Image (tube, rainbow, N blue to C red):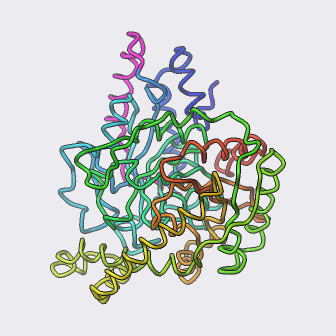
Amino acid sequence: MTDFAYLTITEASQLLYNRKISPVEYTQALLDRIAAHDGPLHSFLHVSGDHALDAAKTAEAEIMAGDWRGPLHGVPYALKDIIDAAGEPTTCHSKVMARNSVPDTDAHVTAQFRAAGAVLVGKTATHEFAIGGPSFDLPWPPARNPWNPAHFTGGSSSGSGAALAAGFVPAALGTDTGGSVRNPASLCGLVGMKATYGRVSRRGVFPLSFTLDHVGPMTRTVEDNAILLNVIAGHDAQDPGSAPTEKPDFTGRIGRDIKGMRIGVIRHFFETDMQADPEMAKSINHAVDVLRGLGAEVSDMTVAPLDTYAATNRVILLSEAFAIHEKWFQERPEDYGELSRRRIMGGAFIRAADYVNATRVKARLVHEFDEAMRGFDVAITASSMDPACEIEDEEASERTYGRQARAPFNLTGSPALAVPTGFSESGLPLSMQIVGKPFDEAAIYQVAHAYEQATNWTERRPPLAA
């Protein structure tokens, strides 16, 4: 019998292509698993059962006819519920959008998945409008961590993280404005990529911050992540932030050794600017030793203090978020959850001069970081400073958002990948972040894959798998 739950995309693709499994049985098996196990996890807001099976039947007929579209053909996936899919509700996990929210057209990334023959099984939980959570005063409860359902998944792509870790889908998309792909990847033992700003179109995605938003792939392995980026990357003239650059094969350097690659460690982010949990710091330092043992040339690097990045990101994000929500705040503030209302409202009190000055600081930080990266192929630092906290501990989850080193790379636009680095004594995932030069995601994947193959962290499964 095939263990459909934890097939990688690479494995599933080979089985589908060789007709050892069918898209219909694969999709049905995952729908059954969602029905059996998602009750306490709340990873999905909407499961597209009939639509998913119809898409699977179409994919099966195409494969049987020899019309192979590539490695996602017949593979199930999930979308964070701020990303549009024609005929499926987009609620943004909010009462504000709970009615009359079924779009007629796909988001650009959804259209790319559809063209690749992938099968959408549903829309996943998010923090309200990708900012307010984990919240318990919304129409749907927050997603919980499959490694321990009493704990937080990270956000805001929380349901996508939970669904992947639980074996409900092998692929999911999230969005990332201050770390919202890399946060659940870090806390759920996954691989999450925020590619270079402009690499992936945001058209058809409800915005949080126009100049900081990214859409990113989330998977259980590095190679699978590169496969997803191959599908969704590319210029989109209808997204003003989309970059007209050539798209490489992001899997092209996977499997190459990293001997002689230059890796900088931004150690001050997690040792002096902020002190990471000892288990998290130890796991990152051990990962650095593994990479050094694989032949990489490793040395420390210094950039601007972490709080400079964090403060600049916060001013820009909140200013732009309030501009997006101002009309609804005036007309129906009661329809927002308390957390998102409180966070977005902060943008109302930021002066135009502060926003302008923050954009100027951002430009300086971009230049300084690019200069610092000249001597390196990639950089390594923390993603989350701590393992997942208890989800109902409001103070701890609020602290989580400040205790991270992801926001700097939304500001710089640099590609950044969260990868697992082990587990805490209590069995919760640990992680690090690998950062690259603009539009050089392939180098990140090369290093991440080499590390992944030298360890066994992606082979472990949460208790749900038993």
Task: Kindly indicate the quadrant of the structure image that contains residue 111.
Answer: top left
Q: Is residue 358 above or below residue 245?
A: below
Q: Position of residue 407 (x, y in %)?
A: 50, 69
The one of 292 and 140 positioned closer to us in this rendering: 292
Q: Is residue 322 above or below residue 83?
A: below
The one of 368 and 414 positioned closer to us in this rendering: 368
- The residue located at (60%, 44%) in the rendering is 443
- Does 339 sit left or right of 99 as displayed? right
The one of 80 and 462 positioned closer to us in this rendering: 80
Quadrant of the rendering where the N terminus is positioned: top right
- The residue located at (63%, 31%) in the rendering is 3
Task: Kindly indicate the quadrant of the structure image that contains residue 234.
Answer: top left
The residue segment tinted magenta is 41-68
Q: Is residue 92 above or below residue 448?
A: below
Task: Kindly indicate the quadrant of the structure image that contains residue 208.
Answer: bottom left
Check if residue 45 falls in the magenta segment.
Answer: yes
- Residue 143 shows in this picture: yes
Q: Position of residue 155 (x, y in %)?
A: 49, 65
- The residue located at (44%, 40%) in the rendering is 77
- Does 127 sit left or right of 161 as displayed? left
Extreme residue toward the top, this view: 65
